[in-house]
C-alpha cells in the first residue's frame, strides 16, 4: 500500500516493466492559496520497486480509495513452491 493523500487516481501512473513495479505521479499545488506552513510536498514523484519473484502479470490488481493505493501482485504458478511426493521402497 502507498499513501497518496490529496492526489486523484487520474494523476497516478502505475506499471510493471523489467521486473519493476513503477509508480509515478504529480501532486499539483492549488493555485491562489498561500500557506504559512505546509507538511506536504508538491511536484512530480517516482518510486520503483524491484520484484525478484515471477509475477502473474494478467492478474495484477490495484485499488485506490481514500488516498490509499493498494497493489496486489500474485505470484506466477512457476514461482509457487511445489511439493513432490517420493515413493519410498
Image: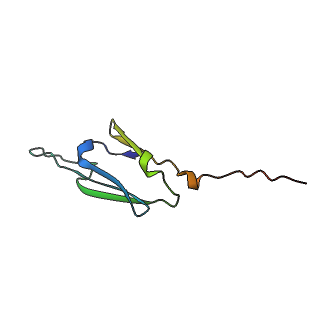
Question: In the rendered image, is residue 7 in sight?
Answer: no
Q: Residue 8 at x, y = what percent?
A: 25, 42
How many marks the image carries: the answer is: 0
Position of residue 50 relative to residue 6, above or below, is below
> In the depicted view, which residue is nearer to us: 29 or 54?
54
Left or right of 11? Residue 73 is right
Position of residue 50 relative to residue 8, above or below, is below
Left or right of 14? Residue 33 is left
Question: Which residue is drawn at the image coordinates 27% and 42% (left, top)?
Answer: 9
Image quadrant in which the C terminus is located: bottom right
> In the depicted view, which residue is nearer to us: 41 or 77?
77
Question: Which residue is drawn at the image coordinates 48% and 51% (left, top)?
Answer: 56
> In the depicted view, which residue is nearer to us: 58 or 15?
58
Question: In the rendered image, is residue 33 in sight?
Answer: yes
Taking the view exactly as shown, the residue that stands out farthest to the left is: 32
Which color scheme did the rendering employ for the protein?
A: rainbow
Q: Quadrant of residue 17?
A: bottom left
Q: Residue 58 at x, y = what percent?
A: 42, 48
Q: Residue 61 at x, y = what percent?
A: 41, 43
Left or right of 31? Residue 21 is right
Q: Residue 23 at x, y = what percent?
A: 34, 54
Taking the view exactly as shown, the residue that stands out farthest to the bottom is: 18
Question: Which residue is drawn at the image coordinates 71% and 50% (left, top)?
Answer: 83
Position of residue 18 relative to residue 88, above or below, is below
Image quadrant in which the N terminus is located: top left
Taking the view exactly as shown, the residue that stands out farthest to the right is: 89
Amino acid at each position: 500500500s502507498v499513501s497518496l493523500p490529496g492526489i486523484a487516481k487520474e494523476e497516478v501512473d502505475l506499471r510493471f516493466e523489467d521486473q519493476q513495479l513503477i509508480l509515478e505521479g504529480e501532486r499539483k499545488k492549488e493555485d491562489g492559496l498561500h500557506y504559512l506552513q505546509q507538511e506536504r510536498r508538491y511536484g512530480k514523484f517516482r518510486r520503483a520497486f524491484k520484484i525478484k519473484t515471477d509475477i502473474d502479470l494478467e492478474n495484477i490488481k490495484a485499488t485506490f480509495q481514500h488516498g490509499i493505493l493498494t497493489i496486489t501482485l500474485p505470484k506466477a504458478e512457476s514461482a509457487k513452491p511445489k511439493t513432490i511426493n517420493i515413493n519410498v521402497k
